[in-house]
Amino acid sequence: MLKNALGRFRLIGILEGISLLILLFIAMPLKYWFGMKSAVTIVGTLHGYIFLAYIAAIVYTMIKVKWPFRFTIGALISAFIPFGNFILDRRLKNLKTN
C-alpha cells in the first residue's frame, strides 16, 4: 500500500477518517456527557495534525497521479463527511483494480 503516491494517500485517508470518527463519536460524547474536556483537546489536536497530513497528501497525489481538479475537490470534501474517507478509499481501490 505504501509503494506509490496513491497507496500512501489511501493510508493517510483511512487514518484521517478514523481520527474523525473517534473525535465525533468518542471524544465529543466524553466531553459533553461526562465533562471530560481533555478528550476533545487531545483527540482534536491529533486529528488536526492528521488532517494537515491529509491535505498535503491530496496535493502530492494530485501532482503525481495527475488527478482532475474535480476529483481533488471531492477528496477534500470527503474529509468533512463522517465515513467519507472510507467511501473514497473504496472508489480508489476499485479504480486501481479496474
Image: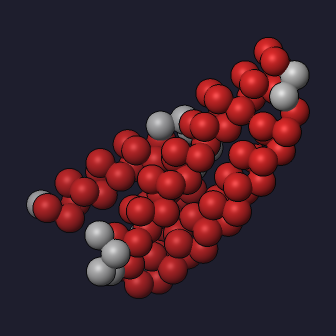
Q: Residue 85's spot in the image, x, y percent?
A: 46, 47
Q: Residue 50's spot in the image, x, y percent?
A: 63, 61
| Quadrant in which residue 39 is drawn | top right
Observer-nearest residue: 61 or 9? 9
Q: How many marks?
A: 0
Residue that lies at the very extreme toward the left in this rendered image:
98
| Quadrant in which residue 71 is drawn | bottom left
Observer-nearest residue: 41 or 67? 41
Q: Is residue 22 above or below residue 19?
A: above
Q: Which residue is drawn at 30% across and 58% down?
A: 92
Residue that lies at the very extreme toward the bottom in this rendered image:
64
Colouring scheme applied when the structure was drawn: secondary structure
Q: Is residue 37 above or below residue 58?
A: above
Instruction: Let me know if residue 86 appears in the view.
Output: yes
Q: Which residue is drawn at 34% across and 75% down?
A: 2
Q: Residue at x 83, y 44 (%)?
A: 41
Q: Residue 80's spot in the image, x, y percent?
A: 62, 43
Q: Residue 98's spot in the image, x, y percent?
A: 12, 60
Quadrant location, the N terminus: bottom left
Q: Is residue 62 above or below residue 52?
A: below
Q: Which residue is drawn at 62% across and 27% down?
A: 25
Instruction: Let me know if residue 74 appears in the view.
Output: no
Left or right: 58 as drawn, with respect to 51: left
Left or right: 32 as drawn, with respect to 70: right
Residue that lies at the very extreme toward the top in this rendered image:
33
